[in-house]
Image (cartoon, helix red, strand yellow):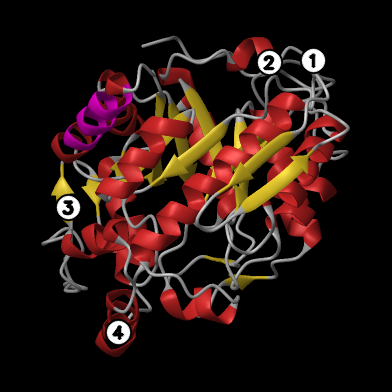
Amino acid sequence: MKIFWFIPTHGDSRYLGSSRGARVADHAYFKQIAIAADSLGYEGVLLPTGRSCEDSWIVAASLIDATKRLKFLVALRPGLVAPAQSARMAATLDRLSGGRLLVNLVTGGDPDELAGDGQFLGHAERYEQSAEFIRIWRELLARSHTGEPFDFDGDHLSVKGGKVLYPPLNRPYPPVFFGGSSGPAHDLAAEQVDTYLTWGEPPAEVRKKLDDVRARAAARGRTLRYGIRLHVIVRETEDEAWGAAAELVSQLDEATVAAAQARFRSMDSVGQRRMAELHGGQFNKADVRQGLEISPNLWAGVGLVRGGAGTALVGNPKQVAERITEYAALGLEYFILSGYPHLDEAHRFAELVFPLLPLDVREKLSAPTLTGPFGEIIANHDAPKAAAAS
């Protein structure tokens, strides 16, 4: 089980859909979160992409020296950067980080944003282009270890005598992650990527998606890894956790929710449509569980105003660990998590839930400490005793 956290390069706050409680999203804050994730034992961090975000490649590069073990899951955007240039960027970042690069193929689902970036292909054509892009990208990096050139002539992209002269440390190339809910997305995953990601739907729906991708991959003689993208709201008690969920959406009003949902409906992303269908755009501020707890401890309230991943695991540490374990039983290995605000919740989740999960965090965090291992030294004498395992 590999637990990732999230660098909120689009901004961070204590409340959704409001500037109240907002934090300055600058390099110093991103660095704080990265250092926290690294020192707490998270496997890596996801850096988002889009015009509302700082550039993920530049942010990842800026965090190399601030971290030691942390891996960076960084976006590839077909149609915005040429595959050969993207391959060189990946090889460089992988080498300079000591082999800590993972890449996230993002086809995109917002036609307005894509048009603003100069991308005018429809849904089906974008997946065709993405398939050509990642094939060129993979071949260039795989062949960089031998110096062999690569030729490709596709419907959307072509290269002749393509080369990457300085190979990545990861062989044959940094692992490729990808998420999508449509048939073409599942075909692309089955054919070319290493890890398929799903957003946080109820376990039965996640199982159906994974079964479909597995079957398509098996038909091509391939085996993939799998992961899930979720938010988390964990507190010492279940009541406190649901109180925190209510606080997170306490600044929302019907007009804000309606405007966000109208924006999401304009997208042609199947995954975004599935997120919207989980809650229908309705919520009861007096009871945030009503109509939004779509599966035990799985809450769709984040998706009322946030695009992309819109569900959160809400509960006490035992409940959240149990839900994660249920997903893991479906074959999910990577858990890419986030919580508001991200710096605080990175600590909270690690402290409360890591001890309940099968992780190798303790081995990663073996550096000596100058303070008590279990808290503040009391009266210049002893640290408090560790709580007995339950």
Foreground pick, 94 / 39: 94
Quarter placement of the N terminus: top left
Expressed as whole percent of the image width and height from the top left, the position of residue 201 reads: 24, 45
Q: Which mark is residue 364?
A: 2
- Disc nearer the start of the sequence (4/3): 4
Mark 1 or 2, closer to the camera: 2
Expressed as whole percent of the image width and height from the top left, the position of residue 305 reads: 36, 72
Gap between marks 4 and 3 measured at Cα: 19 Å
Residue 359, compared with residue 95, is above or below; it is: above
Gap between marks 4 and 1 measured at Cα: 47 Å
Question: Which region is colored magenta?
Answer: 208-217
Residue occupied by mark 3: 293
Residue occupied by mark 1: 367
Foreground pick, 241 / 266: 266
Residue 376, compared with residue 367, is above or below; it is: below
Q: Label 1: state its secondary structure.
A: loop
**Label 1 amino acid?**
Ala
Mark 1 or 3, closer to the camera: 3
**Label 4 amino acid?**
Asp
Crowding at mark 1 (Cα within 10 Å: few <14, some 14-19, many 20+): few
**Label 2 amino acid?**
Lys
Q: Label 3: state its secondary structure.
A: strand
Q: Which mark is residue 253?
A: 4
